[in-house]
Image (cartoon, rainbow, N blue to C red):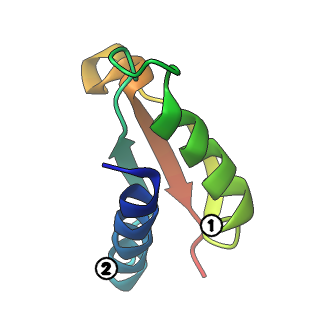
Amino acid sequence: MTLGEAEEALTLFFSEAKRKKLFGIKVIHGRGLRSPKGPVLKEALSKWLHRSFSKWVLAYATAKDCDGGLGATYIVLRSR
């Protein structure tokens, strides 16, 4: 995905998660190993979580190895 496509997809994913009243989600963004500039989506996700989605996010962390490791992020959602 491009950054624009990824941000749009993430917005829809967050909206659906909130509609379903989920407490947590996992975003698989990949590790960016084939990107000439490194992990573009992973770095963008961190910025988006602080800027655009902060009202929905309580906490986030890199996933365990069995769930994608450095290529995925767990996100704990606010309950409001």
SS for callout 2: loop
Q: Is residue 63 left or right of residue 49?
A: left
Q: Nearer the viewer, residue 9 or 26?
A: 9
Number of residue marks? 2
Q: Quadrant of residue 18?
A: bottom left
Against 14, residue 5 (above or below) is above
Amino acid type assigned to the residue bearing label 2 in the image: Lys
- Res 64 visible: no
- Could you tell me which residue is drawn at 36 percent across and 72 percent down? 17
Q: Is residue 7 left or right of residue 77?
A: left
Q: Nearer the viewer, residue 20 or 33?
A: 33
Pinpoint residue 12: horizontal percent, then vertical percent: 36, 75
Q: Quadrant of the C terminus?
A: bottom right
Q: Residue 20 got which mark? A: 2
The residue carrying mark 1 is 53
Pinpoint residue 35: horizontal percent, then vertical percent: 40, 22
Amino acid type assigned to the residue bearing label 1 in the image: Phe
Q: Disc 1 or disc 2, which is closer to the eye?
A: 1
Pinpoint residue 67: horizontal percent, then vertical percent: 28, 27
Q: Quadrant of residue 6?
A: bottom left
